Image (spheres, helix red, strand yellow):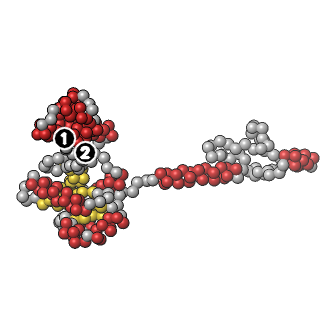
Amino acid sequence: MTTNTISRAAIHDGDRQLRRTCVRFGDEFREIRLRVGVSQAAVARAVGVARSVICRLEQGDPDVSPRIRARAAAVLGADFRIAIYAEAAPMIHDAAHAGIVEAVLAMRHPSWGVTLESPVPGPGRRSSDIRLDRGLDTILIEVESRVRALEAIIRECAEKRVAVAASMGPERRVHVVLVLPPTRHHKGLVAAHPRIVATAFPAGHDALSRALADSSARWPGDGMLWVAPARRRSSGEDHRAVDVDHGSARSSSRSARSRPSGTTGRRGTKLSDPYSSGKPRAPQVGTPPGTHDTRSKPAARSSEAATLAR
């Protein structure tokens, strides 16, 4: 998706979630207020706002500030909390995530059908980073640039596999693959939990790599794949290329200064003779054709006079 598309989707989904949250908050606030047995006016006086503000709060107006909501909840003896839940795939990823996805796609055989950000059936807006389909096999690939909670990742992979398998026929084989960059953090995390990793992802890196690249290999099952982000040309390399060009230009300039006069320069301009006025010079008497007289101009004229005298 383009940046503008992502921006529009984020604004639309974010505003919709805010409206739903505010409506739910208003309904719950009203139920607690009625159970306590206080009026809107009493709550408003305690908080220091007009009664219309509490009325708007209960109607789900998102423009009522969080500070007013927290104070009104405290008046009723309720807790005001702001929470966030990861229920959908992010709209943007870090550069390392995109590089790993690119590297995984480069490893696969063309016989695998690919779907990026494949939706996962069920509640929420979940998706798999890469979905591969070939024959009766469906592979759900989850790419994580940095794992902080291994148990949460294992649980998420298992839930996605169950949801996708339930939406397909019983003959389909659905597997999950966790892709990690081979960083020191991830190596240490796997080394600290060898039995958990072996149980959740029994297939090794070599077996998964062969199955990805081979058109006839049987898929070995759930597993973990170590993939480094695809390398891109860095700005440092660009600078080095520029420096090389500048060096060749300097060497060309030096070689141009060392050429004899009358030869062609770097840009095709003819280099002038320091003794010439710009007009073509006549051949000098006593100088063999095709040779260059390296003597100074007065010495050359004295030679010409001596030759004529003889």
Residue 56 located left or right of residue 291: left
Depth check: give the residue in front, 291 or 267. 267
Q: How many marks?
A: 2
Q: Earlier in the sequence, mark 2 or mark 1?
A: 1
The disc placed on residue 76 is 1
Residue 3 located left or right of residue 202: right
Depth check: give the residue in front, 86 or 69. 69
Residue 243 located left or right of residue 217: right
Residue 4 in view of the camera: yes
SS for callout 1: loop
Residue furthest left in the image: 170
Residue 177 in view of the camera: no
82 vs 58: above or below: below
Q: Residue at x 35, y 58 (%)?
A: 229
Residue furthest right in the image: 309
The kind of residue on which mark 2 rests is Ile
Q: Residue at x 49, y 54 (%)?
A: 237
The kind of residue on which mark 1 rests is Leu
The disc placed on residue 82 is 2
Residue neighbourhood size for the residue with mark 1, other residues' Cα within 10 Å, grouped as few (<14), some (14–19), many (≥20):
some
Q: CA distance from mark 2 to mark 1?
A: 17 Å
Choose mark 2 or mark 1, whichever is in front.
1
Q: Residue at x 19, y 59 (%)?
A: 155
Image location of residue 214, percent across then percent down: 23, 64
